[in-house]
Every structure is written in C-alpha cells, then in structure tokens.
C-alpha cells in the first residue's frame, strides 16, 4: 500500500504501528526516528522498523507516508524539521492524543498543508516503550481522522484505506470536535485516575491501604501508569475542553459528597443506579 | 471443616462463597436464604447451595457457620432475626464492604456477640447475581477479619483456617481501621468511577464520545457497574472515612485544574510522573 513509511517516535504507539504495517504487508520499508537513540535501537530489535536515521528530516526522505508518533508538543518542531525533505506527494499524518494544535502547526509549517491529515487511533495501553508494542493494538478500534477544508481528498482516501487495512474503523470528524469528544472519553478519565492515585498515596494509611487494594483500585487507576509526557501534552493542548469537564466532575463529586454527608439514601442510590445504567448501556452498544 | 453452613444473601459474593466452599469440600451442607426467592432458586441451580429456606431464622437452624452476604444495611435486621435460632456454638461472620456498623449491630443483637467476627474478602466484580458467581473469586485475595476485645479466640481461629482453606490471605485488623483503609483502596475509587460516568453521560456530546470511548474509559469506570445498593450501603456506613477522602480528591483535582488552566507544564508533568511512580510501585509489591 505504501512503498516507504517514516515513523517519527517509536514508543508504544509508533512501534505498534510499525509492527502492524509489517505484519499486514502494508509497507515495503519502514524507516524510524526517535530523539532517544536507545529507543530507536530497541524498536529495530523488536522488528517495528526496517531501518533508522539520525535525524527526522533524513528519515522522511523518499517516503510516501510520514507518521508522527511522539507526544503531541514534540510534533511542532518535527513538522518544521521535516518540511524541506518531504516528497511533494507524501501523505503526512500523526497518531497523537489531541488534534487542534497539531492541525494548526501543520498548516503553519508545511509547504503542502493539504497533504497533512491529523489522526488518532482510540487504542493504547498504560505500558510504554517499544517492548510493550503490539501488532494487534489497533484491531477493531475507532481511528479518528481530522481533515480540514484544505485537505487533499486523495490523501484522506489513502489514509482511510490504510486505517481499514489495519483492521481499525476510520471516523472522520473536525479537529476541534475531536478534542471535545475525546476529552470526555479519554482525557478526563486520565486526569481522574492520576488524581485518584495521588489522593490515595498521600494518605497517612496508604501503606495499609496498598496491602488491601485489589482489582477495583488497579482498574480505576490503570491509565495513571501511562507516559507522563503524553499526559502532560494532552493537558497542555486540550485545556479548553478539559477545564470545564474537570469543573463538571468536581460538581458531580461535590453533590455526591453532600448526599453522603447527609446520609441521603435515595439520592446516593440514584447516583449509583444511573451511573450503572449508563455504563451498562454504553458497554452493550460497544459489544455490537 | 464445617458441617452445615448458612449463607444469607446469594448475590455474586454469597453465591461465589457457596461455590468455593463446595468446590473445596469445606462444608457438608450449605443452606441458603435470600429476600428474593428468584435469586435463591438461581443460586441453587448454579450449584452454590445445597438447600434453601424461606426465612433467615429457619436457615441458620443447626448451622455451625453463618455468613451474612447481603448489602451492609440489610445485616442489621438479619442479625436480630437469626439470634434466637443460632446454635450457641455457631460461628457468625459476614462478607460486607464496611465493618464498623456491622460489628456494632452484632454486639447489640446477638446473645453471644463473641461468636461474631466481621469479615471482608478484598475480591469482587462489577457483575452481580448468582450467575456471575465464581468458585475461584477469593483465591489469592486479602480477607479482612475484624475481631473485637470480646471476640472468642476459637471462633477467630476457625475463620482464619477457613479463609486460608479458601486460598485467601487472612488479615486481622480493627473494624474502624478497616473502614478507613478500605475507603482509600476501594470506596473512593467506587465513588470516583460513578461520578466520572455521570459527568461523561451528562455531556451534550456524550453520544459522540461514547462511540470513541475505549479501554481507558471502560477500566476507569468499571466499578460503577456494580450493584447500586451495595454502593449505597458503603456510603451510608462509611461516610466518616469517605467524606474527608472526597475532599482530598477534589483538592487534588482542583490543583491539577489550576495547573492546566495556567499551562504549567512542569507542575502537570510532576503530577502524572508521581502518580505513575506510585502506582507502578504498588503494582510491583502486589506481584510479589
């Protein structure tokens, strides 16, 4: 499907993409770059890339697909770095967690901004690094693509085909809409999990609690074990959507706190019953 | 180990205990009771009990072990109901989520309060009902036992043996201490997950978010799918520990909100890095 693919950033996500492309025979060559030479070597050892280069610009040379797979803020510099070496017909995309900023940066940095289309596979893991990569990570997931008015329809069509060939489900939406919606589905849970973990470990009796904490604690906090730089960049590039959501979450918690304080049995049960009904309903649609 | 065991309440937990006792040959007969006749029948069909009775008092007749396995608040009435029919040598325990109230109620209701020792296996599932029961649910879990000064040492010894024979790890601690510690490990995550689910579903764009929500959302909210009555009773009997924890959680969230609002990169990364370090450290001790 592509002759030569560049993957810039070879953590869990970039390396999983490399494995998936190779496993499904969707790229002849996969050239990798990462700011950390060690990560690059490990991704090569893991089989995620077939070659590597010392610079981002050198990596994209002669590639017909370029994928940015770093934490979001690093993409700004990368786009500026690679512009001069990009083949005029290259399709450029990313697999970062937020889309508004990246789409703006691409419009500013690239001579052919229409060839850039933001992307975000709704898949991941709390683990990080090329060792945690999985060829099947993207199978069955929704994969957001965020074209703009200036986007080249042919580039979009090629990415839709690629996403489908990877076993994922392409979902096209505007970058701003993506950021609002994913803040609910993914970024608020991430912030909630990190804050929950910190609240627990700052308790005087955390040592005793840690000895008793079981699967409930493990799952509720799982995403707090993810890469802190990825989380930081999500917060820095999606504050506009996250801050009001955090306010809504604190209001929700405050309401429940009052009901508990007042021993308001009916109000407490109503909260849990409606949360259960909503989540069970969501799970049921997901299973279809 | 026991001749005749009564299990009062045959949801996920009670029915799992029945299956575990039968599977490991730890009780000759297991007699069940549940306020819902339908649940009782399903638990029998599932193989969790060998017989059932129409009343709690009738169920405990001739039993040498009685286990209360209902939501916590229902235990108060049950203890009063069964007292007259309890064999004088019967050991009585429970597997409820909070311990302070139950221990108090037992001291008030029973003629032989020393034979009651509160219990709480740190295991469970967001599923409910006898169909979700699993014989192996308790294997490897910590199982709290909360004796008081008045507790009969022989009763405690028999429960420690039983818990060990079930493949779990007995942890003896005071009821009040249990409630503080488990509020951190289990009850705060439960409240956080329910509030998070409600915050998400009350968003205008929940339908779009639901279509993109993936494993992160699923896991962070998992425990919100649990039995709402169980959650209600936890809140009603452990408010003293939960309310200050909720305040600490909201402060934590408020701090992170400010850092995001101010785009304070270093502060944001520090929160996520310390949460990751703490959780990864906890997981490592757990794997040992």
Image (cartoon, coloured by chain):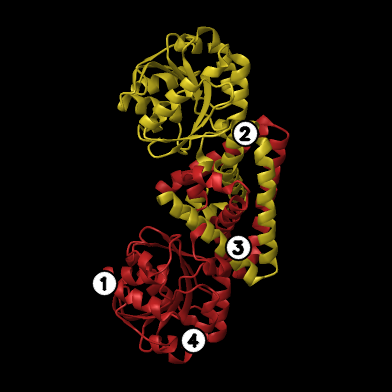
Chain colours: A red, B yellow
Which chain letter goes with mark 3?
A: B
- Gap between marks 1 and 3 measured at Cα: 41 Å
**Badge 4 density bin: few <14, some 14–19, many ≥20, Cα 10 Å:** many
- Gap between marks 3 and 2 measured at Cα: 31 Å
Q: Nearer the viewer, residue A72 or A158?
A: A72
Residue A200 in sight in this render: yes
Q: Nearer the viewer, residue B98 or B226?
A: B98
Which residue is denoted by mark 2 in the rendering? B176
Q: Nearer the viewer, mark 1 or mark 4?
A: 1
Does residue A108 lie above or below A281 as drawn? below
Q: Nearer the viewer, mark 3 or mark 2?
A: 2
Residue B130 in sight in this render: no
Q: Are marks 4 and 2 in contact (CB under 8 Å)?
A: no
Q: Secondary structure at mark 2?
A: helix
Which residue is denoted by mark 1 in the rendering? A25
* Disc nearer the start of the sequence (3/2): 2
Left or right: residue A46 compared with residue B108: left
**Badge 1 density bin: few <14, some 14–19, many ≥20, Cα 10 Å:** some
- Percent across and percent down for residue B170 are 45, 34
Q: Secondary structure at mark 4?
A: loop
* Residues beneath discs 1 and 2 located on the same chain: no
Which residue is denoted by mark 4 in the rendering? A112
Q: Which mark is residue B271?
A: 3
- Percent across and percent down for residue A170 are 42, 64
Which chain letter goes with mark 4?
A: A
Q: Nearer the viewer, residue A2 or A132?
A: A132
- Gap between marks 4 and 2 measured at Cα: 66 Å
Residue occupying the point 48% across, 49% down = A218
- Gap between marks 3 and 4 measured at Cα: 38 Å
**Badge 2 density bin: few <14, some 14–19, many ≥20, Cα 10 Å:** some
């Amino acid at each position: 499907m592509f002759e030569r693919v560049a993957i810039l950033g070879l953590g869990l996500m970039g390396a999983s993409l490399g494995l998936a492309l190779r496993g499904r025979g969707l790229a002849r060559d996969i050239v990798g770059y990462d700011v950390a030479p060690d990560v690059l070597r490990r991704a090569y050892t893991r089989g995620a890339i077939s070659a590597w280069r010392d610079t981002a610009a050198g990596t994209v040379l002669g590639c017909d697909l370029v994928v940015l797979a770093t934490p979001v803020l690093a993409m700004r510099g990368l786009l500026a770095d690679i512009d001069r070496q990009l083949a005029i017909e290259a399709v450029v995309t990313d697999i970062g967690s937020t889309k508004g900023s990246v789409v703006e940066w691409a419009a500013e940095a690239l001579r052919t901004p229409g060839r850039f289309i933001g992307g975000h596979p709704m898949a991941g893991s709390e683990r990080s690094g090329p060792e945690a990569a999985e060829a099947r990570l993207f199978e069955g997931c929704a994969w957001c693509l965020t074209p703009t008015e200036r986007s080249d329809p042919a580039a979009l069509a090629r990415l839709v085909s690629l996403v489908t060939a990877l076993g994922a489900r392409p979902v096209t939406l505007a970058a701003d809409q993506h950021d609002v919606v994913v803040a609910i589905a993914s970024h608020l849970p991430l912030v909630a999990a990190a804050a929950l973990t910190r609240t627990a470990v700052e308790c005087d009796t955390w040592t005793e609690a840690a000895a008793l904490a079981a699967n409930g604690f493990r799952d509720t906090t799982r995403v707090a074990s993810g890469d802190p730089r990825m989380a930081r960049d999500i917060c820095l590039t999606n504050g506009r959507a996250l801050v009001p959501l955090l306010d809504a979450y604190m209001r929700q918690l405050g309401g429940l706190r009052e009901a508990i304080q007042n021993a308001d049995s009916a109000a407490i049960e109503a909260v849990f019953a409606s949360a259960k009904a909503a989540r069970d309903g969501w799970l049921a649609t997901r299973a279809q």
